[in-house]
């Protein structure tokens, strides 16, 4: 078989397998991310069916996957929502950062991985998966709940914080000094503030480049602009992902809405490729030795996330059951943790980070949605009812 | 009379409006950016949780709004009764009625019974202030205001026709 024929066969087999896995995940009501990672492990180096011809294709595809993940995230939020969340829940965001980034950093230092890996692992444990959690809240019928805005605000702040964190990480992993690290941070901060200002005050400027009613030009134009900005951002070490996120925020109104609809299928395709590629690059044999550390880290950081959510909901005036729901809902980590680990591993930081991050995300993304269902269980509801009855009896 | 409505942004999803009732319950409407909506009823023991959410299509939401609006109107009309000796009544137009399929003007209800037909409810649709040209269909609920004897003769008129 010629190289290009083999490429077609491999890509076809893998995408077909992903399609079936996604259907399976949907049947069981879970996220497809863990299954995609496992598929990547099976097809990768040291896996059951290693691929040979298509690795280059998956590599490029995974880079586009990260860019599209972030672009769609940016499109989903309006600049107004970002600013409002920031002003209303910044304490919750700060608490979230301290409680969840520190365990990851401490853990990496304990393992003796050094400060650069510590910065990366801090990010891995910090950021919850907004994709998984938003889908989960919808499935559990909790979008109407009063604590839901608190959960979403924490997610928004985390995503926005990535615009500052990723450039720092990008600078640190290439071994840049303090000065260069600070420079990229300043560039990123200035870019974020400028884009937010532009989107808030002159939202139509960027959007007027595109026509919401012509799908072909919109698709090509938005995709082109995003990849261009991502490339330029990469060039100045601000991380391609952040560039894509900012393009998403800068677009607004009808154009953003139409672009979101057009690009979602593309995002699903390339994001799947991204998760698979991360699995591909990881040798399954490396996972076993880090399984116990990953489990310990997962338990610790799930506990700190629950605490974060509990305190954030308490600040927002929720009752005790609502605080538990908030905490438990925030526990799944997902796409961002993989993006961060991918960035660090790609630059050659601590080879064990990739298997650890894979195992860690597999654990939290499976355990999180299960934990989130606890407040819907019979005994939890019975306890809430007993408490309600007792309170009413006391009031009488 | 003022009702407290809370508006909350749901970043990335849409908005939620809550109505807080006098009895301490909470009813919410989640409006998605895509234009869909859910009605959420909150738990009595856990007032932060929606114990049930119902997805409504455009038509269903419209119908529900109409039914609620009609029930408020009937309630307000009923309030007049003590003051003026007037009564409000809902009369269903039977299929055997000679007026089913005709127009409201055919009944000459105002002249014959000194009552006033203020609204017609057809399935979920409310027709406020119907004119003589408004059509009548079997199963319509006619809302009329009048004196007791007037309403009694209107019921007879709608069922059996003039005679």
Image (tube, coloured by chain):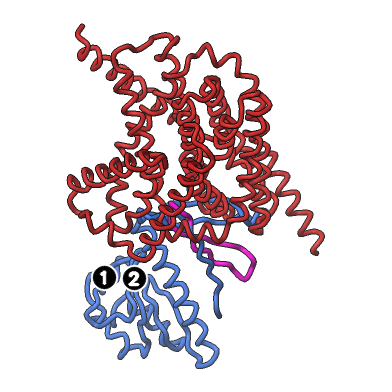
Chain colours: A red, B blue
x 55%, y 20%: residue: A352
The residue lying toward the viewer, choosing from A238 and A24, is A238
x 55%, y 78%: residue: B2
Where residue A392 appears, as percent x and y from the top left, is 76, 59
Image mark 2: chain: B
Q: Residues within 10 Å of mark 1 (few under 14, many from 20)?
A: some
In the rendered image, is residue B50 in sight? Answer: no
Q: Quadrant of residue B131?
A: bottom left
Where residue A139 appears, as percent x and y from the top left, is 48, 41
Residue identified by numbered label 2: B93
Q: Quadrant of residue A36?
A: top left
Examine the structure image and report whether residue B50 is included in the region drawn in magenta: no
Q: Is residue A66 left or right of residue A364?
A: left
Identify the mark nearer the N-term, 1 or 2. 2
Segment tinted magenta in the rendering: B10-29
Q: Quadrant of residue B137?
A: bottom left
Image quarter in which the C terminus of chain A is found: bottom right
x 19%, y 9%: residue: A2
Q: Which mark is residue B100?
A: 1
Where residue B1 appears, as percent x and y from the top left, is 55, 80
In the rendered image, is residue A144 in sight? Answer: yes
Q: Secondary structure at mark 1?
A: loop
């Amino acid at each position: 078989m010629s190289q290009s024929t083999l490429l077609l066969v491999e890509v076809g087999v893998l995408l077909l397998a992903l399609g079936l896995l996604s259907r399976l995940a949907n049947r069981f009501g879970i996220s497809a991310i863990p299954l995609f990672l496992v598929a990547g492990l099976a097809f990768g180096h040291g896996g059951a069916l290693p691929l040979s011809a298509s690795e280059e294709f998956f590599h490029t595809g995974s880079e586009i996957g990260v860019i599209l993940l972030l672009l769609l995230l940016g499109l989903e939020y309006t600049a107004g929502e970002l600013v409002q969340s920031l002003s209303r829940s910044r304490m919750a965001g700060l608490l979230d950062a301290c409680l969840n980034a520190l365990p990851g950093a401490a853990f990496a230092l304990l393992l003796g991985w050094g400060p650069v890996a510590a910065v990366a692992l801090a990010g891995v444990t910090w950021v919850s998966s907004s994709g998984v959690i938003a889908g989960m809240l919808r499935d559990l019928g909790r979008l109407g709940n009063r604590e839901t805005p608190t959960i979403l605000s924490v997610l928004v702040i985390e995503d926005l914080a990535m615009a500052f964190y990723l450039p720092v990480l990008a600078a640190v992993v290439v071994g840049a000094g303090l000065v260069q690290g600070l420079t990229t941070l300043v560039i990123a901060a200035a870019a974020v503030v400028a884009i937010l200002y532009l989107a808030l005050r002159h939202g139509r400027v960027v959007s007027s480049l595109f026509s919401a009613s012509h799908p072909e030009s919109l698709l090509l134009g938005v995709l082109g602009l995003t990849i261009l900005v991502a490339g330029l951002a990469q060039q100045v070490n601000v991380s391609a992902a952040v560039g894509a996120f900012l393009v998403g925020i800068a677009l607004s109104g009808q154009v953003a809405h139409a672009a979101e609809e057009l690009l979602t299928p593309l995002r699903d395709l390339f994001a799947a490729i991204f998760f698979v590629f991360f699995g591909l690059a990881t040798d399954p044999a490396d996972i076993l030795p880090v399984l116990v550390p990953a489990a310990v880290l997962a338990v610790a950081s799930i506990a700190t996330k629950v605490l974060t959510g509990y305190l954030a909901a308490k600040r927002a005036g929720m009752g005790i059951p609502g605080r538990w729901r908030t905490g438990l809902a925030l526990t799944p980590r997902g796409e961002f943790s993989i993006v961060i680990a991918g960035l660090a591993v790609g630059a050659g930081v601590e080879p064990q980070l990739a298997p650890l991050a894979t195992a860690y995300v597999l654990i939290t993304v499976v355990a999180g949605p299960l934990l989130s269902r606890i407040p819907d269980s019979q005994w939890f509801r019975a306890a809430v009812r007993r408490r309600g009855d007792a309170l009413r009896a006391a009031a009488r | 009379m003022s009702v407290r409505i809370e508006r909350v942004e749901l970043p990335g999803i849409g908005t939620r409006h809550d109505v807080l009732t006098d009895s301490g319950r909470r009813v919410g409407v989640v409006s998605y950016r895509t234009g869909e909506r859910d009605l959420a009823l909150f738990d009595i023991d856990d007032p932060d949780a929606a114990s049930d959410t119902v997805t409504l299509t455009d038509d269903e939401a419209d119908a529900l709004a109409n039914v609620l609006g009609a029930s408020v109107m009937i309630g307000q009309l009923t309030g007049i009764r003590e003051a003026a000796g007037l009564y409000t009544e809902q009369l269903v137009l039977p299929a055997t009625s000679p007026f089913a399929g005709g127009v409201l003007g055919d009944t000459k209800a105002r002249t014959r019974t000194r009552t006033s037909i203020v609204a017609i409810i057809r399935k979920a649709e409310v027709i406020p202030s119907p004119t003589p040209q408004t059509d009548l269909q079997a199963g319509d609920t006619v809302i009329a205001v009048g004196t007791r004897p007037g309403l009694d003769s209107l019921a007879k008129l709608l069922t059996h026709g003039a005679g």
